[in-house]
């Protein structure tokens, strides 16, 4: 029997009203949500499966088992899967923005140095890097899902390039992470990383939402815009703090390794010079004894 579902006032009703139709619908819906997951969604779902934090695919399967056992209603089961789908989409978008921001920071610092990055440099370096990174990341994400032909979505690629350019520019101009490295203070790196992440996340969240609105994929809603901006800013700010601390740690590690290598090399040179002098003195003494 073919499954047919009608939605009225956000209430899902199976037609005909049989348990078998409802089970069929829920299984098909969960399969579709799983198929939509590319590498970003799978990474996030894998983290939730491992840590048991947040809704995962296994939790959705458990919900279906509860429905089969009559412990939850059809409405509750559908809403649970819808919620999982929405969270996966939102987090995949956030991960894409975070990776784009971090990549833009690293690339711009590598190109322009750890000094203050002005808007001119940020636009010249950060914008194209951000556009390329986000387009590539989301292209790979769509290519790794189970929806045929989804990766070659020209409209989505254009949206990714626009929002990626905004993320890259904002990340670059607000990336004062290098200041902590130069000052030798991890607190400065952590603070600047957080500030960079907050600014980058706010622009990324708002930019991605407004790009969707501009392309007609969403109707503008000020509350939804604010929510996207706030959530993206918070997540990116947290990641920015970690990045700031990580860059400081790597710089110090590299500096310490360089110092140790230099120290060891200097000690080796001194030791070699000393042993050479000893050999020279002993050699002269031997010659004096045997050939005098």
Image (cartoon, rainbow, N blue to C red):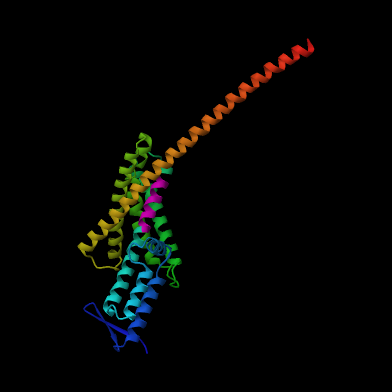
Q: Position of residue 20 (x, y in %)?
A: 35, 86
- Examine the rendering and report whether any part of residue 278 can be seen: yes
Q: Which residues are magenta?
A: 95-108
Above or below residue 201? Residue 261 is above
Above or below residue 121? Residue 140 is below
Q: How many marks?
A: 0
Q: Residue furthest top?
A: 292
Above or below residue 21? Residue 208 is above
Q: Position of residue 245 (x, y in %)?
A: 37, 44
Can you say which quadrant of the picture contains the N terminus? bottom left
- Magenta stretch, main secondary structure, is helix
User: Closer to the camera, 248 or 76?
Assistant: 76
Q: Residue furthest right?
A: 291
Q: Is residue 269 magenta?
A: no
Kindly indicate the quadrant of the structure image that contains residue 90.
bottom left
Identity of the residue drawn at 23% across and 63% down: 224
Image check: 259 left or right of 57? right
Q: Is residue 104 magenta?
A: yes
Identity of the residue drawn at 32% across and 40% down: 187
Image check: 154 left or right of 217? right
């Amino acid at each position: 029997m073919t499954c047919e579902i009608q939605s009225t006032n956000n209430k899902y009703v199976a037609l005909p009203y049989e348990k078998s139709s409802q089970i069929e619908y829920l299984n098909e819906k969960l399969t579709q949500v799983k198929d939509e997951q590319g590498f970003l969604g799978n990474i996030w779902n894998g983290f939730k499966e491992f840590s048991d934090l947040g809704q995962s695919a296994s939790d959705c399967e458990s919900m279906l088992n509860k429905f089969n056992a009559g412990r939850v209603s059809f409405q509750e089961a559908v809403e649970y899967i819808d919620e999982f789908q929405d969270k996966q989409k939102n987090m995949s978008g956030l991960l894409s923005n975070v990776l784009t921001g971090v990549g833009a920071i690293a690339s711009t610092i590598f190109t322009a140095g750890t000094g203050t990055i002005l808007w001119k440099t940020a636009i010249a370096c950060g914008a194209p890097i951000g556009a390329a990174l986000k387009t590539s990341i989301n292209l790979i994400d769509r290519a790794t899902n189970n929806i045929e032909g989804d990766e070659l979505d020209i409209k989505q690629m254009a949206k990714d390039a626009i929002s990626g350019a905004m993320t890259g520019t904002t990340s670059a101009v607000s990336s004062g992470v290098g200041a902590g490295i130069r000052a030798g203070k991890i607190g400065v790196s952590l603070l600047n990383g957080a500030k960079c992440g907050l600014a980058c996340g706010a622009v990324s969240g708002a930019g991605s939402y407004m790009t969707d609105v501009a392309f007609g994929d969403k109707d503008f809603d000020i509350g939804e815009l604010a929510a996207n901006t706030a959530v993206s800013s918070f997540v990116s700010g947290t990641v920015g703090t970690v990045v700031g601390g990580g860059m400081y740690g790597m710089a110090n590690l590299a500096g310490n390794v360089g110092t140790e290598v230099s120290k060891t090399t200097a000690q080796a040179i001194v030791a070699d010079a000393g042993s050479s002098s000893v050999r020279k003195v002993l050699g002269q003494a031997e010659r004096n004894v045997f050939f005098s």
